[in-house]
Image (spheres, helix red, strand yellow):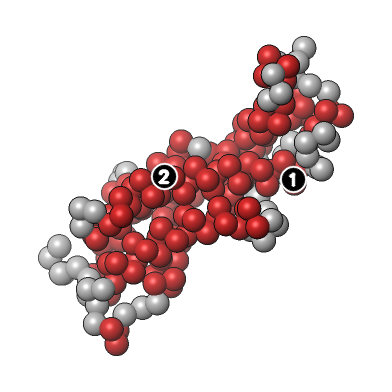
Amino acid sequence: MPKAGYHHGNLRQALVDAALLLVEEKGPTGFTLSEAAKRAGVTPAAVYRHFEGREDLIAECALQGFRIFGDVMEQAFQGGHPTALAAFEATGRAYIAFARQHPGHYVAMFESGISMQRSPELYDAAQRGTAVLEQAATQLSLRIPADRRPPPQMFSNHIWALSHGVVELFARGNTSANCPISPEDLLESGIGIYLRGLGILDPDH
């Protein structure tokens, strides 16, 4: 029987919500449109009123995820307050929190193979979170003499890669990754080592 949301014109979002659960459970390629339709309480044919296929549905999941991610990162950064370092570290913690709280979105965004160039809307949403990381890196890198200052994009991508690695290995229920340190502490210590290497933090910090 169709869910109540279908009668109220919310079929599109009901399908997205169903897909997010399936992506979390089975991965982005581990389910069919028929399964998504069944979760949403509609016939498979109803899916095609809103989406061309599974990839289109997953792209919408990614789009919504990037919008949430942008909000989360901007809130964590707080315009670089109270300090550049505190704001920078907050973005790293926010990355882990987002992955935990929105696992279906996270997989659709970063593990589905969906191209960010698929649509201008998706590209712009994806760039928003990246822009926050670059802004945080730019602000913090002002502590480094100009002749030794890394490009902000490279700086932010290094931290993004570190954050992503911690999430993948330690923050998503990976039972094979036996680590006594929390993902948050692991990321913070890794960022600290990186920043000390750049000369942003004192060795004893």
- The picture places residue 72, in percent across and down from the top left corner, at 41, 44
- The picture places residue 137, in percent across and down from the top left corner, at 34, 66
Q: Amino acid at mark 1?
A: Asp
Q: Is residue 109 left or right of residue 76?
A: right
Mark 2 residue element = helix
Q: Report if residue 172 is visible in the image.
A: no
> Which residue is labeled 1 in the image?
56
Residue pictured at 66% horizontal, 30% vertical: 13
- Count neighbours of disc 2 (C-alpha within 10 A) and say few if under 14, some if 14 to 19, many if 20 or more: some
Picture quarter containing residue 106? top right
Q: Earlier in the sequence, mark 1 or mark 2?
A: 1
Q: Residue furthest bottom?
A: 147
> Which residue is labeled 2 in the image?
72
Front-lying residue, 4 or 57: 4
Front-lying residue, 171 or 67: 67
Q: Quadrant of the C terminus?
A: bottom left
Residue pictured at 79% horizontal, 21% vertical: 42
- The picture places residue 172, in percent across and down from the top left corner, at 48, 41
Q: Amino acid at mark 2?
A: Val
Q: Which dot marks residue 136?
A: none
Residue pictured at 63% horizontal, 53% vertical: 121
Q: Are marks 1 and 2 in contact (CB under 8 Å)?
A: no
Q: Report if residue 97 is visible in the image.
A: yes
